[in-house]
Image: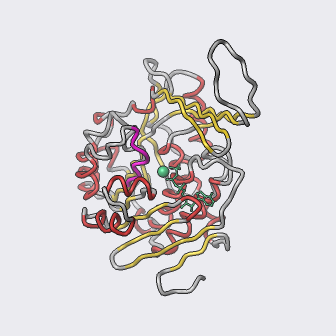
Amino acid sequence: MSKMSRRTYDVITFGDTCVDLIMSGTDVVPRFGQVEKLVDDYVLEMGGSCCIFACQAAKLGLRTAVLGRVGHDDFGRLVVSRLAESGVDTRYVSVDPTLKTGLGIALCQGGDRAILTYMGSLAAVGPDDVTDELLSLARHLHHGSFFLHTGLIEAMPDVFRRARALGLTTSLDTNWDPDETWDSTLDEVLPLTNIFFPNEQELLRIARRDDVDLAVEWAREQGVPIVAVKRGEGGASAFEASEGVDCTVDPVTGGDSVGAGDSFDAGFLAAWLRDLPLSECLKIACLCGRSVAGSIGGLAGQPAWAQVVGGNRAVRVRSPGQSNR
Ligand SMILES: Nc1ncnc2c1ncn2[C@@H]1O[C@H](COP(=O)(O)OP(=O)(O)OP(=O)(O)O)[C@@H](O)[C@H]1O
Ligand SMILES: [Mg+2]
């Protein structure tokens, strides 16, 4: 792995530590007036984009650490065990007895979902936690939940600037902005980002364009060298310099889409940090995203490196002017 030999970690990220309780069935709409309804199924699993990303990165062979906090509670212990089981170094995840571990309750019915979120430890990382000493242990810094890590938003331009000065490369997946303003300090962070991982809807809103090509062009004008755009079962595209690559995927059903985008990011990075070409980075990213999209929860479908290197006919990359391969 040429981009990452001498440092302790290949990648570090900030933990949006939380647990997802996913309730599913034909009728999961609560009724007040003390009505008790029975649901068909539930899953309790670690959530959080950055934590799901970290687990996928570790499973793909990247030496990965998470910086974060959890509460002194069972959900906190669940988060730490899932990270550790996946191979993530958890020494920088501390237990803070003043916090409760974050919790998301998702009610899933007929392909739609409603979510109630208690933030707690999810947004507990602050600027003082992100020391130069920690940053300099890694080759790459990935930031996943830009808008939910409220303790870090103001500091992110400084964090990315310091990371780059210390020789790290950087990647950013904002995920959705619950306030839907799509600004804050993003305009200062993008020029310091090597790889930008939005989904199509997020990109259009961030770029304030109604056309994806124009939005990609806008992102590149901000100084982002690589933009990878996710389109769910429509696959993804990646752009670098004059190169553009599309990837189509055979759709999967039966899973929820939790964590597909975060595992996509980790797949792309695991290939990029191994110096593989753009088309290969995109293909491996889509294989990871598709595999997770076909499973319940963000962790269940995450593949290992040996499962993605050989490729898979369910995922096909194409550069404009090329036939499918
Ligand atoms: N239903 C599906 N069938 C096949 N592949 C899928 C499906 N959903 C997602 N993928 C794969 O996973 C990748 C990332 O998923 P998606 O586009 O949903 O990211 P996202 O919107 O960032 O998701 P997230 O909800 O995790 O933030 C897609 O580019 C695609 O390759
Ligand atoms: Mg996403």
Which quadrant of the structure image shows residue 78? top right
Main secondary structure of the magenta stretch = loop
Q: Residue at x 63, y 53 (%)?
A: 292
Residue 139 seen in the current view: no
Residue 305 lies left or right of residue 277; in this view the side is right
Quarter holding ligand 1: bottom right
Return the residue nearer the eye: 135 or 159: 159
- Vertical relation: 218 (above or below) 137: below
Residue 77 lies left or right of residue 237; in this view the side is right
- Vertical relation: 268 (above or below) 322: above
Most extreme residue toward the top, as rendered?
34
Residue 149 seen in the current view: yes
Return the residue nearer the eye: 28 or 278: 28
Residue 170 lies left or right of residue 271; in this view the side is left
- Vertical relation: 14 (above or below) 231: above
Residue 295 percent location from the top left of the image: 68, 50
> Does residue 317 show up magenta in the picture?
no
Residue 109 percent location from the top left of the image: 67, 39
Residue 52 percent location from the top left of the image: 54, 46
- The stretch in magenta equals 172-178
Q: Residue at x 39, y 71 (%)?
A: 239
> Does residue 175 show up magenta in the picture?
yes
